[in-house]
Image (spheres, grey):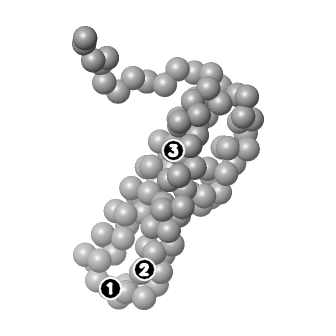
Amino acid sequence: MSFVATLQRDAELAPPEARPYPVLSSLAHDLRQPLSNIEAIVYHLASILPQNDQKVQAHLAHIRELVQQTDEILSSSLREAAQGAPLTQSAPPAEA
């Protein structure tokens, strides 16, 4: 399943009233297009660049992996938010 299809599916699973993190939903929405474009560009480059150039193919594979990882992070966060699970805090709160 493509990145865009995964995010669209996740968004459909979570009705607006079940989204306690509107900023997260907005961020996921805003990242859809650039990540989809990256995915399309990598696909195109893979089709026109030499298949026997292992260095180029390794770089393209790495970009695909990064797009997939981003997809997994966003999808997981959206699912957790839709289920009302608290998001993991990545940094301690700032002290006053």
Q: Relative to 9, does residue 94 appear above or below in the rendering?
A: above
Of 65 and 33, which appears nearest the observer? 33
Left or right: 45 in relation to 52: right
Q: Secondary structure at mark 1?
A: loop
Q: Relative to 79, does residue 89 appear above or below in the rendering?
A: above
Instruction: Give the foreground label among 2 and 1.
Output: 2
Kind of residue sitting beneath label 2: Ala
- The structure residue drawn at horizontal position 42% and vertical position 80%, both measured from the top left corner, is 46
Residue 49 visible in the displayed image:
yes
- The structure residue drawn at horizontal position 37% and vertical position 86%, both measured from the top left corner, is 49
Cα separation between marks 1 and 3: 38 Å
Cα separation between marks 2 and 1: 11 Å
Q: Find disc 1 in the rendering and name its residue.
A: 52
Q: What x and y, as percent, mark residue 86?
A: 52, 20
Q: Residue furthest front?
A: 96
Q: Find disc 2 in the rendering and name its residue.
A: 46
Cα separation between marks 3 and 2: 29 Å
Q: Residue furthest top?
A: 96
Residue 76 visible in the displayed image:
no
Of 35 and 44, which appears nearest the observer? 35
- The structure residue drawn at horizontal position 45% and vertical position 67%, both measured from the top left corner, is 38
Kind of residue sitting beneath label 3: Leu
Q: Relative to 24, does residue 49 appear above or below in the rendering?
A: below
Q: Label for residue 27?
A: 3
